């Protein structure tokens, strides 16, 4: 009898209670991040009036932990059913001070240097082919230097050393930009 209940519970295949809590917390955190945006930025997100009012009320709350936590839960409740990834991307774009693009606008064109680096680093298995193609287009580039720079990026990524990886990516970008342009 107990085994039938366990089998029925496994057959339901819904998100676990823990996953539901993580989702709710993510919505609350996004709501709190939205409260830190400027009013013009908040207006550009095309939110309904109730949610905008709730975010404005959150800003006006006293610095009471319990009150802010309750109101964050309320904002999270209002945000249920919205397209979370798109809203998160829009908020991240607005939070990034270097970003000149606005949500819904066309992306900036990618530079030839960035395009070449992206091709080189797209897949470790095809890097050698991409190096050959890049050298055919731009004869000033040196195969050995490109190999070493790509190898150092892949090695740092494998070790999960973000600082070294970033430095290596900057070196590759600098090298390619000097010899392409």
Image: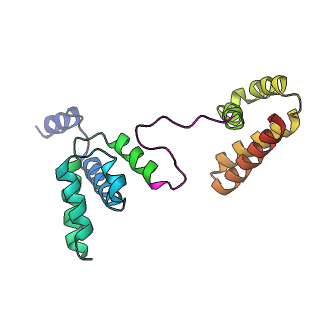
Residue 140 coordinates in the image, percent (x, y): 89, 32
**On the image, which quarter does residue 139 sit in?**
top right
**Of residues 143 and 32, the one drawn nearer to the viewer in this rendering:** 32
Question: Looking at the image, is 64 positioned above or below residue 158?
Answer: below
Residue 115 lies, with reference to residue 45, above or below; the image says above
> Considering only vertical position in the picture, is 14 above or below 64?
above
Return the residue nearer the eye: 39 or 128.
39
| Residue 107 included in the magenta stretch of the image | yes
Snapshot quadrant of residue 102: top left
Pick whichever, 84 or 114, lies toward us: 114
Q: What stretch is highlighted in magenta?
A: 95-111
Q: Is residue 164 above or below residue 84?
A: below
Overall secondary structure of the magenta stretch? Answer: loop
Work out which residue is located at the far front of the displayed protein and give it.
40
Q: Position of residue 108 (x, y in %)?
A: 56, 37
**Residue located at (77% from left, 46% from top):** 174
Left or right of 96? Residue 115 is: right
Give the mark count.
0
Instruction: Give the residue at x 34% y 47%.
Output: 44
Residue pushed farthest left?
A: 1
Horizontal side, residue 50 vs residue 162: left or right: left
In the rendered image, the quadrant that contains the C terminus is: top right
Within the magenta stretch, is there residue 37? no
Residue 104: image location, x then y, percent:
40, 37
Relative to 99, is 31 on the left or the right? Answer: left
Quadrant the N terminus occupies: top left
**The quadrant where residue 63 appears:** bottom left
User: In the image shown, does 125 or 9 lie closer to the viewer?
Assistant: 125
Colour scheme employed for the rendering of this structure: rainbow
């Amino acid at each position: 009898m107990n085994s039938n209940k366990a089998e029925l519970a496994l057959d339901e295949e819904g998100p676990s209670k823990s996953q539901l809590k993580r989702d709710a917390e993510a919505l609350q955190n996004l709501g709190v991040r939205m409260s830190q945006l400027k009013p013009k930025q908040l207006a550009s997100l095309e939110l309904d009036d109730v949610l905008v009012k709730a975010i404005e009320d959150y800003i006006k709350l006293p610095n009471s932990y319990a009150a802010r936590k309750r109101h964050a839960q309320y904002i999270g409740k209002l945000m249920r059913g919205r397209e979370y990834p798109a809203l998160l991307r829009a908020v991240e774009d607005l939070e990034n001070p270097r970003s000149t693009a606005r949500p819904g606008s066309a992306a900036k064109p990618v530079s030839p240097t960035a395009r070449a680096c992206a091709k080189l680093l797209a897949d470790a298995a095809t890097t050698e082919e991409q190096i050959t193609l890049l050298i055919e287009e731009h004869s000033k580039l040196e195969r050995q230097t490109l190999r070493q720079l790509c190898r150092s990026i892949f090695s740092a990524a494998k070790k999960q050393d973000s600082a070294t990886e970033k430095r290596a990516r900057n070196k590759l970008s600098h090298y390619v930009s000097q010899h392409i342009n």
